[in-house]
Amino acid sequence: MSTPPPHPEAAPASPYGTLPPASQPAARKPVSLPRIADMHARGEKISMLTAYDATFAAMADAAGVDCLLVGDSLGMVCQGLSSTVGVSLDTMRYHTDSVSRGLRRVQGTAWLIADLPFGSYQQSREQALASATVLMQAGAHMVKLEGGGWTTETVRFLVERGIPVCAHLGLTPQTVHALGGYRVQGKGDAGALLQQQAHALQDAGAAMLVLEMVPAALAAELTTALTRCATIGIGAGRGTAGQVLVLHDMLGIHLGKMPKFVRNFMADAPGVLPALQAYVRAVKDGSFPDDRRHAW
């Protein structure tokens, strides 16, 4: 007499909460560059969060987050550094690979962006290409670099070689010492230069543009003007095409003072997944950010 197969509930649990080798087919189509452009054109808000490991990446994808950013903010969040300047390309490769594997394990559909860390693209366009290649081979769909002006030709060089690029203006954490600290950028006359740089980056082929700690009115104006480049705000008001936050910040997990532009979504949620889902809903319906509380 053959032994009946064990009941599914009796199957041994995977150790350490590891992800299953496969999951149900994805409920949404993979987020792609054309889909991001379509969302931007239709006025659908784009949700983005940072991710640094496989499990949180899978959970954010399940919550419906459109884009995951392997940010060099991991230097402060994961490594305990005082800024992002000390993050290496090898560290970014490791975390990009981890996040990418997490998405693959659950057939995730989020668009994956990875930061080019300080010192990995400033020397030359060729250095930027070599660094971007490392992150793309680790699973990134797009790379992000900071600053305007000199970066324009680097963006063009990468895009012409088939590497999607997200630019970053306003407060650029890699150059925080040159900026004099974590301060709002683009006020007054400085706004004209920021606008000029943003248009140049769009013309060079940047498909997305993070605007960090930029006055809300300026960010909204740029969002309307940049028809081929979706703006993603962080401390830049609700008028941008999308929003991004550091994952740990929006879950209320932090080692220091919570930035003004952050909302703690765990405060009213019974768990991490509902908090992530609440973030996506709030970005999509425009209730986050609240310009009276989270912007300048």
Image (spheres, rainbow, N blue to C red):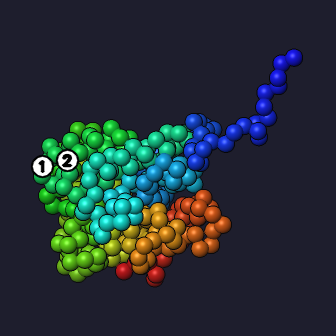
Residue at figure coordinates x 63%, y 68% from the top left: 269
Q: Residue at horizontal 33%, vertical 76%?
A: 215
Q: Quick one: 88 or 65, which is closer to the camera?
A: 88
As drawn, 275 above or below 205: below
**Image point (66%, 66%), residue name:** 270
| Residue marked by disc 2 | 128
Q: Which residue is mark 1?
A: 124
Spot occupied by residue 226 in the image (x, y as percentages of width and height):
31, 60
User: Quarter of the image holding residue 168?
Assistant: bottom left
Around disc 2, counting alpha carbons within 10 Å, would you say few (fewer than 14), some (14 to 19), or many (20 or more)?
A: many
Q: Which residue occupies 32% across, 50% down?
A: 92
- Give neighbour class at mark 1: few <14, some 14-19, many 20+ (Cα, 10 Å): few
* Tag 1–tag 2 contact (CB < 8 Å): yes
In the rendered view, would you say 218 is above or below 274? below
**Residue type for callout 1:** Ser
Element marked by disc 2: helix
Provide residue 25's location: percent of width, then percent of height: 60, 37
Q: Is residue 166 visible?
A: no
Furthest toward the top, the residue is 1
The alpha-carbon separation of the residues under discs 1 and 2 comes to 6 Å
Q: Quadrant of the C terminus?
A: bottom left
Q: Position of residue 170 (x, y in %)?
A: 27, 69
**Whole-percent x and y of residue 251?**
52, 67
The numbered mark at residue 55 is none
- Identify which amino acid the numbered label 2 is placed on: Ala
- Viewer can see residue 290: yes
Q: Residue furthest right?
A: 1
Secondary structure at badge 1 equals: loop
On the rendered image, what quadrant is the N terminus found in? top right
175 vs 65, nearest the viewer = 175
To which quarter of the image does residue 295 belong? bottom left
| Camera-nearest residue between 228 and 45 | 45
